[in-house]
Amino acid sequence: MSNEVLYEVEDGVATITINRPEKYNALNKDVVDMMHSFFQKAEEDPEVRAVILTGIGEKAFAAGADITAFPGRDSKTVRPFVENGQAVCNYIESLSIPVIAAVNGFALGGGCEFAMACDIRYASSNARFGQPEINLGIIPGYGGTVRLPRLVGLGIAKELVLTGNPIKADEALRIGLVNRVFDSVEDLRNGAMELAKILVKRPGVAIKLAKQSLNNAWEMSLKDNLSYEVDVFCETFDTEDKKEGVDAFLSKRDPVFKHK
Ligand code: COA
């Protein structure tokens, strides 16, 4: 296995780091496949309760799909590649544990799309976001035309996708594409880890069900999603974590959840 994606676990937090610094962490097939298997590893490890996705260094989170793979590809041969990238983004979004994107530089094209598949986005002030595919005569394919309007609204998404122009971190914060901006990459990494360690302590079943219900907001009708929320709300009342959380509150102590 190459070292183009790194995986480490600390205190219940798995960090997945894209490691192609000389190519601004561009996403080739191996990188996307490795990311997929590391997200699966995190999901299957009961000790891991949160994931951070980031890029190595201070230049790029990921500067998009690897453009060197594009010449010679046509509508037929590009399909498995784009379907695979979308599937991995969907998998990240559907993970039962929370995923934080720590955006440490350029998040362009597929980089921006992978960040948008994560639950929470933190960025350093040098981060740049964009969907520049239009400049290559193509369009976003890892969910950019679908997740971006849902996150920032259709008008702003159209401007970003149709111009291909990148935006700075403070603008990304203003439009709601990121949750927080940090002065430096070091502060970003610390801030993302701090947030992850808070999430690790939260009850796992409730986290999973809350994520599902929140994700449904993009897909279901209001009526169906409200009814789904009632179902999963009731489900949490049969968990050990609910007993522990309520008992801890009433006994004026901190809860210790077992994620059951
Ligand atoms: N695919 C393949 N290689 C990429 C890449 C990508 N998406 N993005 C950057 N690289 C490579 C460059 O080719 C260069 O490699 P080289 O040194 O072997 O020539 C290296 O990363 C550094 O990039 P460079 O363009 O020299 O740096 P820069 O600071 O001038 O510009 C970017 C940085 C990110 C603005 C610019 O590289 C860029 O626009 N990349 C493409 C973004 C894009 O269109 N993404 C969507 C793809 S669908």
Image (cartoon, rainbow, N blue to C red):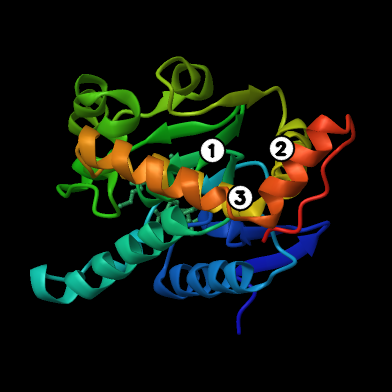
Q: Residue at the location (45% across, 23% down)?
A: 172
Instruction: Name which quarter of the figure residue 86 lies in.
Output: bottom left
Label 3 and label 1: CA atoms lie apart by 12 Å
Kindly identify the amino acid type of the residue bearing the numbered disc 3: Thr
Residue where numbered disc 2 is placed = 195
Residue where numbered disc 1 is placed = 120
Mark on residue 178? none
Going by the image, does 52 lie left or right of 31?
A: right
Disc with the residue nearer the chain's start (1 vs 2) = 1
Q: Position of residue 132 (x, y in %)?
A: 29, 39
The quadrant of the rendering that contains the C terminus is: bottom right
Label 2 and label 3: CA atoms lie apart by 14 Å
Q: Are marks 2 and 3 in contact (CB under 8 Å)?
A: no
Going by the image, does 136 lie left or right of 2?
A: left
Q: Position of residue 251 (x, y in %)?
A: 88, 33
Classify mark 3: residues with Cα within 10 Å, few (<14), some (14-19) or many (20+). many
Q: Position of residue 193 (x, y in %)?
A: 75, 43
Kindly identify the amino acid type of the residue bearing the numbered disc 1: Ile
Going by the image, does 168 lie left or right of 220?
A: right
Q: Are marks 3 and 1 in contact (CB under 8 Å)?
A: no
Which residue is at the far left?
75
Classify mark 1: residues with Cα within 10 Å, few (<14), some (14-19) or many (20+). some
Vertical side of 1 occupied by 102: above or below: above
Residue where numbered disc 3 is placed = 54
